Image (cartoon, helix red, strand yellow):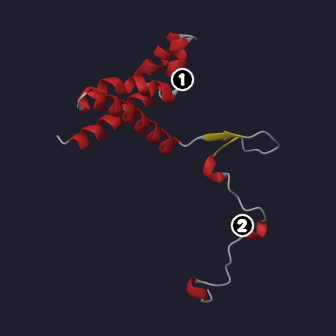
Amino acid sequence: MPVWLRFALAALAVWRITHLLIHEDGPWKIIARFRDKLGAGFWRGLIGCFKCLSIWIAVPFVFFVGGDWVEKIVVWLALSGSAILLEEQLTGPLLVEEGESDELLRRRDDEFRPETEEAAEPDLGSGPRGLPR
Protein backbone atom coordinates (compact mmCIF):
# COMPACT_ATOMS: atom_id res chain seq x y z
CA MET A 1 0.00 0.00 0.00
CA PRO A 2 1.48 3.41 -0.94
CA VAL A 3 2.50 5.72 1.91
CA TRP A 4 0.09 8.46 0.79
CA LEU A 5 -2.82 6.01 1.04
CA ARG A 6 -1.68 4.84 4.47
CA PHE A 7 -1.52 8.45 5.60
CA ALA A 8 -4.97 9.28 4.19
CA LEU A 9 -6.54 6.24 5.84
CA ALA A 10 -4.81 6.98 9.14
CA ALA A 11 -5.97 10.63 9.04
CA LEU A 12 -9.58 9.54 8.46
CA ALA A 13 -9.32 6.98 11.26
CA VAL A 14 -7.89 9.55 13.71
CA TRP A 15 -10.71 11.95 12.85
CA ARG A 16 -13.37 9.23 13.17
CA ILE A 17 -12.23 7.93 16.55
CA THR A 18 -11.71 11.42 17.99
CA HIS A 19 -15.12 12.56 16.71
CA LEU A 20 -16.76 9.43 18.14
CA LEU A 21 -15.25 9.95 21.59
CA ILE A 22 -16.12 13.64 21.79
CA HIS A 23 -19.40 14.13 19.90
CA GLU A 24 -21.25 10.83 19.78
CA ASP A 25 -22.91 8.54 22.31
CA GLY A 26 -21.97 5.30 20.54
CA PRO A 27 -24.03 2.13 20.30
CA TRP A 28 -26.07 1.49 23.44
CA LYS A 29 -24.62 4.81 24.74
CA ILE A 30 -21.32 3.10 25.60
CA ILE A 31 -19.24 6.20 24.81
CA ALA A 32 -21.62 8.49 26.73
CA ARG A 33 -21.38 6.26 29.80
CA PHE A 34 -17.59 6.20 29.46
CA ARG A 35 -17.50 10.03 29.35
CA ASP A 36 -19.81 10.21 32.39
CA LYS A 37 -17.54 7.89 34.40
CA LEU A 38 -14.56 10.13 33.76
CA GLY A 39 -16.09 12.79 35.98
CA ALA A 40 -14.22 16.08 36.20
CA GLY A 41 -10.50 16.67 35.98
CA PHE A 42 -7.73 15.93 33.50
CA TRP A 43 -9.33 12.99 31.68
CA ARG A 44 -12.69 14.69 31.28
CA GLY A 45 -10.93 17.81 30.01
CA LEU A 46 -8.96 15.72 27.53
CA ILE A 47 -12.02 14.01 26.11
CA GLY A 48 -13.80 17.35 25.83
CA CYS A 49 -11.15 18.93 23.58
CA PHE A 50 -10.94 17.71 19.97
CA LYS A 51 -7.49 19.19 19.38
CA CYS A 52 -6.07 17.72 22.61
CA LEU A 53 -7.54 14.27 22.09
CA SER A 54 -6.54 14.01 18.42
CA ILE A 55 -2.85 14.27 19.41
CA TRP A 56 -3.16 11.14 21.55
CA ILE A 57 -5.44 9.23 19.19
CA ALA A 58 -2.88 9.77 16.38
CA VAL A 59 -0.04 7.98 18.25
CA PRO A 60 -0.87 4.36 17.28
CA PHE A 61 -1.58 5.35 13.68
CA VAL A 62 1.96 6.70 13.32
CA PHE A 63 3.20 3.11 13.31
CA PHE A 64 0.68 2.20 10.59
CA VAL A 65 2.07 4.93 8.31
CA GLY A 66 5.68 4.01 9.10
CA GLY A 67 8.99 5.79 8.51
CA ASP A 68 12.02 6.52 10.67
CA TRP A 69 11.70 8.28 14.04
CA VAL A 70 11.94 11.79 12.64
CA GLU A 71 9.24 10.98 10.07
CA LYS A 72 7.08 9.44 12.78
CA ILE A 73 7.13 12.67 14.78
CA VAL A 74 6.14 14.68 11.71
CA VAL A 75 3.45 12.14 10.77
CA TRP A 76 2.12 12.22 14.35
CA LEU A 77 1.58 15.98 14.22
CA ALA A 78 0.31 15.83 10.62
CA LEU A 79 -2.30 13.18 11.48
CA SER A 80 -3.59 15.27 14.37
CA GLY A 81 -3.60 18.38 12.18
CA SER A 82 -5.47 16.54 9.43
CA ALA A 83 -8.12 15.40 11.90
CA ILE A 84 -8.51 18.95 13.20
CA LEU A 85 -8.87 20.32 9.66
CA LEU A 86 -11.48 17.69 8.84
CA GLU A 87 -13.41 18.48 12.02
CA GLU A 88 -13.42 22.22 11.38
CA GLN A 89 -14.42 21.82 7.74
CA LEU A 90 -17.15 19.27 8.37
CA THR A 91 -18.71 20.78 11.47
CA GLY A 92 -17.68 24.43 11.31
CA PRO A 93 -17.33 26.61 14.37
CA LEU A 94 -20.52 28.00 15.90
CA LEU A 95 -20.69 31.54 17.18
CA VAL A 96 -22.72 32.55 20.20
CA GLU A 97 -24.18 36.04 20.02
CA GLU A 98 -25.69 38.06 22.79
CA GLY A 99 -28.50 40.44 22.07
CA GLU A 100 -32.14 40.62 21.10
CA SER A 101 -31.81 38.29 18.14
CA ASP A 102 -33.76 35.02 18.07
CA GLU A 103 -30.71 33.43 16.57
CA LEU A 104 -28.37 32.08 19.27
CA LEU A 105 -26.02 29.94 17.22
CA ARG A 106 -24.89 30.44 13.69
CA ARG A 107 -22.04 29.38 11.47
CA ARG A 108 -19.14 31.71 10.83
CA ASP A 109 -19.92 32.09 7.09
CA ASP A 110 -23.32 33.64 7.97
CA GLU A 111 -21.45 36.46 9.68
CA PHE A 112 -20.83 38.44 6.51
CA ARG A 113 -24.09 40.09 5.60
CA PRO A 114 -24.59 43.21 3.47
CA GLU A 115 -24.80 46.40 5.49
CA THR A 116 -27.87 47.72 3.70
CA GLU A 117 -30.99 46.02 2.41
CA GLU A 118 -30.32 47.44 -1.06
CA ALA A 119 -27.08 45.47 -1.28
CA ALA A 120 -28.89 42.31 -0.17
CA GLU A 121 -31.48 42.48 -2.96
CA PRO A 122 -30.28 41.04 -6.26
CA ASP A 123 -30.73 43.04 -9.43
CA LEU A 124 -33.59 41.21 -11.17
CA GLY A 125 -33.84 43.74 -13.98
CA SER A 126 -31.39 41.99 -16.26
CA GLY A 127 -30.42 38.44 -17.01
CA PRO A 128 -27.10 37.01 -18.07
CA ARG A 129 -24.89 39.40 -20.08
CA GLY A 130 -27.25 42.31 -19.39
CA LEU A 131 -30.18 40.82 -21.32
CA PRO A 132 -33.67 41.55 -19.97
CA ARG A 133 -35.40 38.69 -18.14
Say above or below: 35 vs 73: above
Residue at 42% in and 26% down: 55
Q: Amino acid at mark 2?
A: Ala
Residue at 63% x, 89% y: name it: 132
Q: State the image coordinates of residue 91 (x, y, percent, origin top left).
A: 52, 41
Instruction: Tell me where residue 41 sits by quadrant.
Output: top right
The numbered mark at residue 48 is 1
Which quarter of the figure has residue 40?
top right
Crowding at dot 1, Cα within 10 Å, few <14 / some 14-19 / many 20+, comes out as some
Examine the rendered structure and indicate whether residue 33 appears above or below residue 63: above
Label 2, on which residue? 120
Specify the amino acid type for callout 1. Gly
Classify residue 115 by image quadrant.
bottom right
Specify whether 11 is left or right of 39.
left
Residue 69 in view (yes/no) = yes
Q: Describe residue 73's horizontal placement relative to residue 118 as left or right.
A: left
Residue 118 sits above or below residue 124 on the image: above
